[in-house]
Image (tube, helix red, strand yellow):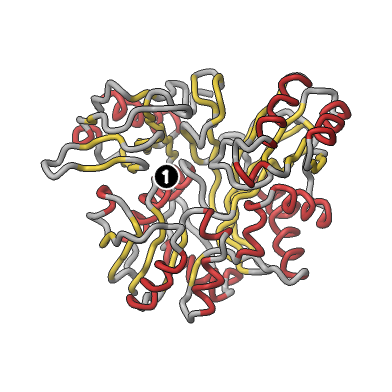
């Protein structure tokens, strides 16, 4: 099969790694890809949000399958356009991708389908946000409605902090994504992420992970796109997995199909495991980053076959096999992230770091003509360690991190520590 993969980040590097390893893959083209992905497929300089350019590339290439990695082109309707042009595309339509593109849409869908979630109020101005914050007792969660690269959420400890966050978002910090806000009840419990393949009415469990969002050790500092993860999620037991599939994923899949907006693709369910049971924090319409880098190395089934089954509506006849080992991913980021940071610093030692129990996924690097590796983003490397248990996987990941020489980089030292 000829496969076209859309995207350029760490998630797409992990997808390219898994797709290239499929016996079904004859040729892989990645748009735009990165220098680190060039060994896995042919990279073509067409941006992931260049919808017209991607359509032209697909028409020229004639792929058997198009896999869309990032959320922005999914929300913008790339799958709709590809399907209309006769291409088999893996990912939800724009209507279904509203589950990530609009947090208000997702909350209202959960309310209609009886899915457990915190209380929420949708606000479009500071007065209504202030009233909702007061009704929540000041301690609440403030969210930008639209896409904000994982940074549009503030967990506020009091009314002043919440109102300041709401004012900043409404004032344009996230552009149009922050013109509508959600003020949500603040719930408590450990977090976990569950992934499922959905082909319309049917759903299939596709792994779990626990992400670490805060920038610094001890869950301190600002929220980020993710500083590390462990899979399987330590607190998401088999019974809880079944409960989430039965009470959240299946009702959502069937409800959206009944309403004429069937979901097809990977659904990311962000969960809070409260004293009264799992509740939905958020939905994403694709694999997470760094969750893809920690989940896919544990998958023993053919990812391409699973994607085809999702498109063809045959998930009811499929099952997925997983390695019994654990995986831990540590993200190495440029100092200053998630704020302002310097680009272009030199990274060395990655060849020493990689090994049988370690995989390095590149999220934001460039490679000079002489082979020099440089940082080109905020989150730069995802170092994934594998082991018989979390302790062994964590040791492998941090041993690899310590072998990498990058004075301008930093990482959390407590990923998967508890």
Left/right placement of residue 87 relative to residue 284 reads left
Outermost residue on the front side: it is 171
Q: Quadrant of residue 20?
A: bottom left
Vertical side of 217 occupied by 145: above or below: below
Q: Which residue is mark 1?
A: 293
* Nearest the eye: 69 or 250: 69
Q: Quadrant of residue 405?
A: top left
What residue is at 54 percent from the left and 60 percent from the top?
74
Outermost residue on the bottom side: it is 86
SS under mark 1: helix
* Number of marks present in the image shown: 1
Q: Position of residue 375 (x, y in %)?
A: 30, 34
Q: Is residue 400 visible?
A: yes
Q: Position of residue 234 (x, y in %)?
A: 56, 34
What residue is at 70 percent from the left and 47 percent from the top?
103
Q: Position of residue 104 (x, y in %)?
A: 74, 49
> Which part of the image, by quadrant, shows the N terminus?
bottom left
> Which part of the image, by quadrant, shows the C terminus?
top right
Q: Is residue 21 visible?
A: no
* Nearest the eye: 56 or 314: 56
């Amino acid at each position: 099969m000829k496969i076209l993969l859309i995207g350029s980040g760490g998630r797409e590097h992990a997808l390219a790694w898994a797709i290239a390893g499929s016996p079904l893959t004859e040729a892989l083209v990645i748009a735009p890809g990165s220098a680190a992905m060039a060994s896995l497929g042919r990279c073509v300089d067409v941006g992931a949000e260049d919808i017209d350019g991607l359509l032209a590339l697909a028409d020229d290439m004639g792929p058997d399958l198009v896999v869309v990695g990032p959320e922005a082109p999914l929300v913008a309707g790339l799958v709709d356009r590809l399907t209309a042009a006769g291409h088999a595309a893996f990912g939800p339509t724009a209507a279904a991708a509203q589950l990530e593109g609009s947090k208000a849409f997702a909350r209202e869908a959960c309310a209609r389908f009886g899915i457990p979630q915190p209380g929420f109020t949708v606000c479009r101005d500071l007065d209504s946000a202030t009233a909702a914050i007061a009704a929540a007792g000041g301690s609440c969660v403030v969210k930008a409605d639209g896409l904000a690269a994982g940074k549009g959420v503030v967990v506020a400890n009091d009314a002043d902090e919440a109102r300041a966050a709401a004012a900043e978002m409404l004032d344009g910090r996230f552009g149009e994504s922050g013109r509508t806000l959600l003020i949500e009840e603040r719930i408590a419990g450990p977090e976990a992420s569950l992934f499922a393949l959905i082909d319309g009415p049917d759903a299939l469990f596709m792994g779990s992970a626990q992400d670490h969002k805060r920038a610094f050790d001890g869950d301190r500092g600002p929220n980020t796109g993710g500083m590390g993860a462990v899979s399987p999620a330590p607190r998401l037991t088999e019974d809880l997995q079944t409960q989430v599939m039965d009470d959240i994923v299946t009702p959502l899949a069937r409800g959206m199909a009944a309403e004429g907006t069937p979901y097809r693709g990977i659904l990311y369910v962000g969960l809070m495991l409260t004293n009264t049971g799992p509740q939905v924090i958020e939905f994403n319409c694709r694999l997470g980053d760094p969750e893809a880098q920690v989940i896919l190395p544990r998958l023993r089934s053919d990812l391409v076959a699973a994607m085809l089954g999702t498109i063809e509506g045959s998930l009811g006849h499929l099952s997925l096999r997983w390695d019994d080992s654990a995986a831990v991913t540590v993200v190495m980021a440029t100092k200053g992230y998630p704020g302002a940071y310097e680009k272009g610093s030199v990274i060395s030692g990655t060849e020493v770091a990689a090994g049988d129990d370690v995989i390095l996924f590149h999220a934001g690097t460039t490679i000079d003509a002489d082979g020099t590796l440089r940082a080109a983003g905020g989150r730069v490397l995802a170092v994934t360690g594998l082991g018989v248990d979390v302790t062994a996987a964590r040791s492998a990941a941090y041993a690899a991190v310590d072998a990498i020489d990058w004075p301008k980089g930093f990482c959390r030292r407590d990923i998967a520590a508890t």
